Amino acid sequence: MDINYLQIGADIKNLEPVAFSLLLLGGFFVYSLSRGCKWLIGIAVILHVSIPVSLAIMQYKIWALPGHGLTNMFLPPHQPITYWLLYSWTNFTLDHVLALLFAFGVAIICFALAKYRENIFLPQEPYLIVLCSLIIGWPRAIFLIPMVLVLAALSLAVEKIWNREARMVIGLWALFVSIFIMAFGSNLISVLHLGALRIGQ
């Protein structure tokens, strides 16, 4: 039976936003139960690693198909294997690596704030924000922290008018902002002329 590697690669790309949307739904669920989401972060990291690896393998298989003389020229012995590696790095891998690095930076910021400003987060919220960053991905995740902090601060200011004991609710805003960014983040990138940040998209 012939395997349609091109279709498999397309299916992986189509299922990627579905998988991350399900993770966000899981984030809503565990946050509503006041539970931690470390295991969801683990799944998100696995997705960011497995998706580019799978796409790179599919690309190699497509180029190596017999009877495709033109694409065969991209592989050894006609080209060094580094040609395929560089192509895969640029088109499939780099944006996922940047997403992981950005989420790591978000984690450093959140846990530093949690350590030095003890009342700013609920215990599960730093993990939730890191999860949201991983779900949104690069480059849309750059909007997450600014939008969450602005909206959380505004809502706290309004709530303190009638409740002096109100605290900043960051986790819920992180979830809602994530939905907004997943839906309209690409438009924001275009409007703000940040298209240079798009890699392999």
Image: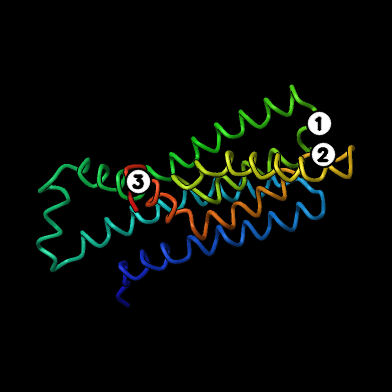
Q: Quick one: SS at disc 1?
A: loop
What residue is rendered at 66% in x and 52% in y? Answer: 175
Which mark's residue is nearer the viewer, 2 or 1? Answer: 2
Report the amino acid beneath label 1. Answer: Asn
Q: Nearer the viewer, residue 133 or 71?
A: 133
* Residue 116 x %, y %: 74, 22
* Residue 78 x %, y %: 10, 48
Q: Quick one: SS at disc 3?
A: loop
- Which is nearer the N-term, disc 2 or disc 3? 2
Q: Is residue 77 above or below residue 1?
A: above
Residue count near mark 2 (Cα–Cα under 10 Å), binned few <14, some 14–19, many ≥20: some
Residue 119 marker:
1
- Which is nearer the N-term, disc 1 or disc 3? 1
Whether tag 2 and tag 1 are in contact, CB under 8 A, the answer is yes
Residue that badge 3 annotates: 193
Rendered-image quadrant of the N terminus: bottom left
Q: CA distance from mark 2 to mark 1?
A: 8 Å
